Amino acid sequence: MPLQSIEKDFAIDSSGFSTTRFVRWFDVKYGKDENWHDWVKVHLMCGVSTHIVTSVEISRAYQHDSPYFKPLVEATAKSGFEMKEVSADKAYLSAENLHVTLKQGAMPYIPFKSNSNPTRTGGTVWNKLYHFYSFKREEFLSHYHKRSNVETVFSMIKAKFGERLRCKTETAQINEALCKVLCHNLCCVIQSMYELGVDPTFGVTVA
């Protein structure tokens, strides 16, 4: 809430946090039976200026990224943030995700894949953004470059609070991952107090 007036551009990505549980994997070629650390996937949306996390979702290790784009964008909009730009990598490319972003009044900067078809059934929005990406690549990349900030956020969280989850049950692991994000946000607000002069005063509703 204290950073709503500052953050206008956002980025989305996901990253894994390893757990104490193991999964078995068998290499058919070499006949080796190995154990690997299981992990959970943290999907988040962050502001590119202060690195505040505006929405977050937790999933199992092998869940696809694209379906989490819409709930992240809608949760950020519901929180009161005015979005102007949303950047994400190719994993989030879909006609629905482009429309969801535009519906919130923001411009989506999601690069198209090498096999993307400009005349597919994605509609006029798909076609226009495809040609913008193809013929104004330098301008597109100048905005898309902001996506690197979400990688910075994951690096900040893992460096300060660890990249492993110590809890054993699934519910506890989800809560532990969310706590890491919450602690990161507290650090971002404190930093903004000193660097940007933000007053982190929250309104109190009197019953």
Image (cartoon, helix red, strand yellow):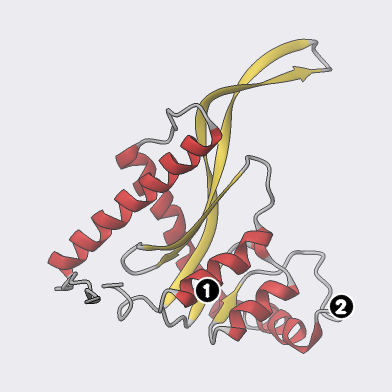
> Which sits earlier in the primary sequence, circle 2 or circle 1?
1
Rendered image quadrant of residue 31: top right
Circle 1: element type: strand
The residue that mark 2 highlights is 120
Q: Nearer the viewer, residue 79 or 107?
A: 79
Q: Residue 199: x, y in percent?
A: 16, 73
Amino acid carrying mark 1 in the image: Val
Q: Residues within 10 Å of mark 1 (few under 14, many from 20)?
A: many
Q: Residue 161: x, y in percent?
A: 33, 39
Circle 2: element type: loop
Mark identifier at residue 86: 1
Rendered image quadrant of residue 13: bottom right
Q: Is residue 21 left or right of residue 198?
A: right
Q: CA distance from mark 2 to mark 1?
A: 23 Å
Total number of numbered discs in the rendering: 2
Q: Residues within 10 Å of mark 2 (few under 14, many from 20)?
A: few
- Picture residue at 76% right of the left edge, 17% below the top: 26
Rendered image quadrant of residue 170: top right
The C terminus lies in quadrant: bottom left
Q: Residue 187: x, y in percent?
A: 24, 54
- Picture residue at 81% right of the left edge, 79% below the top: 122
List the single residue furthest toward the front: 207
- Picture residue at 80% right of the left edge, 69% below the top: 116
Amino acid carrying mark 2 in the image: Arg
